[in-house]
Image (cartoon, grey):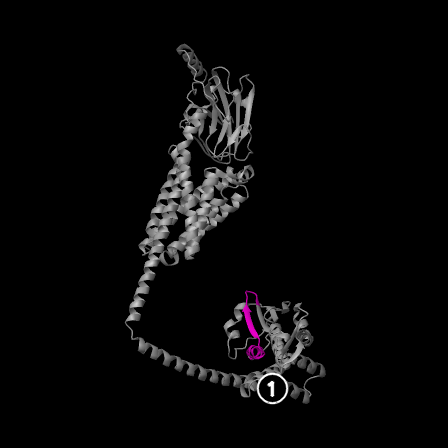
Amino acid sequence: MRTCIRLKVYYFTIPTTLILMFFAVGCSGQVISDFSYRNIGKEIGYIEDKSGKMLLTDVKMLEEDAFTKGKHDILNFGNTSSAWWIKINYIAKAHLPVYLIIDAPNIEYIDVFTTDSLGQTVSFETGCLRSGKPEILIRNNFMLDLPVEVKNGQKTIYLRLKTNNILLAPIKLATAENVIDGQEVKLGIEYIYIGLLIALLLFNLFLFISVKDITYFYYVLYVLTLSSYLLLYIRGYGFIFGDEFRIVFNKHPHVFLSFSVITSLIFCNKFLHLKRTAPKIIKLFYVIGCVGIILFLVSILGFKHTATLIAQFLTVTVAVVAWIAGVIAYKNGHQPAKYYIVAWFFIWITVAIVTLSLGGIINSNELTIQLVPIGSTIELLLLSFALGDRYSSIIRTEQQVRDENLLLVKNQNQRLEESVNERTLQLNHTINKLEDSNAIKNKLFSIIAHDLRSPLNSLLGILSLSDMRLVSSDELHELLQENKKTIKSINNTLNNLLHWAQSQMNGLVTRTENFELKSSLDELLLLYLPLVNEKGIQLVQHIDDRSRVNADRNQINLVLRNLIDNAIKFTPVAGRISFTLQSTVEGLLFAIENEVANQRELDLDNMTGDKIANATPGTKNEQGVGLGLLLCKEYVKNNGGTFYTHLAESSVRFSFILPHSDNIVG
C-alpha cells in the first residue's frame, strides 16, 4: 500500500461525464462512481457457484442478466459452503488511487481479478486462511490497492468469495482519505468496548485475588473466553499476533466460544446458587454444557460449517436459559439476580436481532455487524454490577451479624462468664481424664480377651488335633504355616504391651548410646524380608551415610520395628515402601512412606492422637491393637526427637528427627 497519497481534483466537461455515465449504464445497468466509504451491495451483481469450480473465463462469458443484483447494502449469503462471484463495475478516474475493501475479517478465501492500465489481468489472493501479501493490507478487514489508471474509463472487478461459515460481504470502494474518515467512527466504537472488556477483566481479577471469592474467578474466565472469541474472531483482531496465529485461529474459531459457553454456565450456577434457588434447571445446564463440549470437539476437528450451526444454536439457547434461571432465582428470593436478569435479557435481544439479520429476515448493516461485541460488552458490564451488588449484600449481612454479636457480648456479665468458663474447663478436664482412664482399661481388657486369647485358642486347637492324630503331618504343617503370621502378630503385640505397661507404671528409663541408625534399619529389614516378598512389595531406599545418633537403641529399634510393620501391613500387594535417612540442620531425619489402597479407610486423627488408637486391619487382614504409633511418639519424644505424620491422597508418611550424635552433651 502506498505510504503517501496525493490527490488531484480533475474537472470534466459536462458532455464527457454524460458520455461516460451513458456508456456505463448501457453496458451493465449498474456503475459506481462515488468512492466514499460506504457499502455498495445494491450496486453490484453476484452469482452462486455451488461446485466451486468456475474459472474467471467462465464468469466473463456470462451475460449481464446472469448476475443477480444486490438488494441490500451488505450482501448476506448465509451459512454457505458455495463459492460466490461478484461483479463490480466502476468509473476509474485518471491517477486517482482507489481501494477495494472487504470489510469482514473472517472470509476464508478472497480472489480479486481486475486489469491494469495496459489492460493486462491482475489478480489478488487473500482471506483469513491465507498469509498476508505486500499489496494487501490485512487488519480486521482486507484492503486491496487497485491499479491506478492513466485515463478515465469504466473498469470491472470480479470478486470470488468462499467460506465454510456465515458469509457476510460488506464491500466498499474508497479513496485513501475516505477510508481514513470512514473508519474513524467504527474504530472509535471498537476501542471503547475493547477498553471496557480489558478493564472488566483486570478489575474482577483483582477482586478475586483480594476477596478470594471463586465466583469472581469464574466471571474472569467468562470475560476472557468471550472477549477472545469476540475480538479475535468476530472482529478479526487476531492479525495482531501474526499470520500463523490468525490462520490457525480462523480454522478453529468456535473453540473459544465453547469455552465461553461452559464458563458462563459455571458462573451462572455459582452466582445464582441454583441448587437452592432453581434446582430443576441444573439438568438443563448440564445438557447445554455437553453441547458446548460437542462444539469444542467439532471445531477442533475442523468441521467449521457444522460448528457454525451449533454455535448459532448455543448462543440463542444459553442466553434464554440463563435469563430464565435468573428470573426463577430472583422470584425465590435471590436479590442480586436483578442486574443479572437485565444483562441476559439484553444479550438475548442482541442475539435475536443478529440471528434474524443472519437469516435474512431483517437487513444486515453496520449496526448489526457491531451489535454482538457491543451487546456482549454491555452484558458483561451489567454482570459486573450484579457481582458488586452481591458482594455488597454479603458485606451488609456480615456487618449485621457482627453488630448483633457485639450487642450480645456487651449485655453479658463478664465476671460470671469468666467464672463459668473456668469451672467448665476444670470439669471438662476431669471428665477427659476419667474417660481416658476408662478407655485405657477397656482397651486392655479387649486386647487380653480377644487379640491375645483368640489366636492362642486357635493354636491350642491345632495342637489338640495333632495330639489326637486327627490331622496328618502335612495338614499340621499347613495349619501352622497359616497361623505363623498370627503368632508373629502376638509376639509384636506382647512387646508393645510390655513396653507400654512399663512406661505407665514406672516411667521410661532411657539409656543413651552412640550408634548407627542405618545398621539398625538394615538388621530389621532382613527380619521383615519374608513378609515383604510375600506381598511383592518394592523397597526404595534414600540413605545418607551420616546416620549416627545418641539415643536409646532398644527404644529406637522398637520405633523402627513398629513403623516397618505398620507400613507392610497397609501397603497393597505389589505396592512400594520408601525409606529416607538424611542428615538435616535440625538433626537426623528418618522417614518411611508407603502406598495405601484406600486412604479413606485411614483415620489421620486416630493415628495422630495421644490415646490408644482403634486398630485398623491391614490389606491382607493383618491385625494390630493400636499401641504401636503411641509408643513411637512417646519414645521419639523421650529421646529428644520430634515425630511427624502426613497422609496424602495415595500414601501415608511417618517420620521423626533425632538430634545428631555430636549435638548431644553428656
Q: Residues within 10 Å of mark 1 (few under 14, many from 20)?
A: few
Indicate yes or no whether the magenta region holds residue 261: no
Where residue 606 sits in the image (x, y, percent)? 51, 74
Q: Residue at x 51, y 40 (%)?
A: 304
Asked whether, in this view, residue 523 is left or right of residue 254, the answer is: right
Vertical comparison of 7 with 182: above or below: above
Where residue 631 sits in the image (x, y, percent)? 57, 79
* Quarter residue 460 falls in: bottom right
Indicate yes or no whether the magenta region holds residue 634: yes
Farthest residue in the bottom direction?
467
Where residue 254 sits in the image (x, y, percent)? 49, 43
Vertical comparison of 540 with 626: above or below: above
Task: Give 162 or 463, whichever is nearer the viewer.
Answer: 162
Residue 547 in view, yes or no: yes
Task: Give 388 or 486, whichever is nearer the viewer.
Answer: 388
Q: Residue at x 68, y 84 (%)?
A: 471
Residue type, mark 1 in image:
Asn
Where residue 629 sits in the image (x, y, percent)? 56, 77
The quarter of the image holding the C terminus is: bottom right
Span of residues in magenta: 627-651
* Quarter residue 575 falls in: bottom right
Residue that label 1 marks: 457
Farthest residue in the left direction?
411
| Label 1 SS | helix
Farthest residue in the right direction?
473
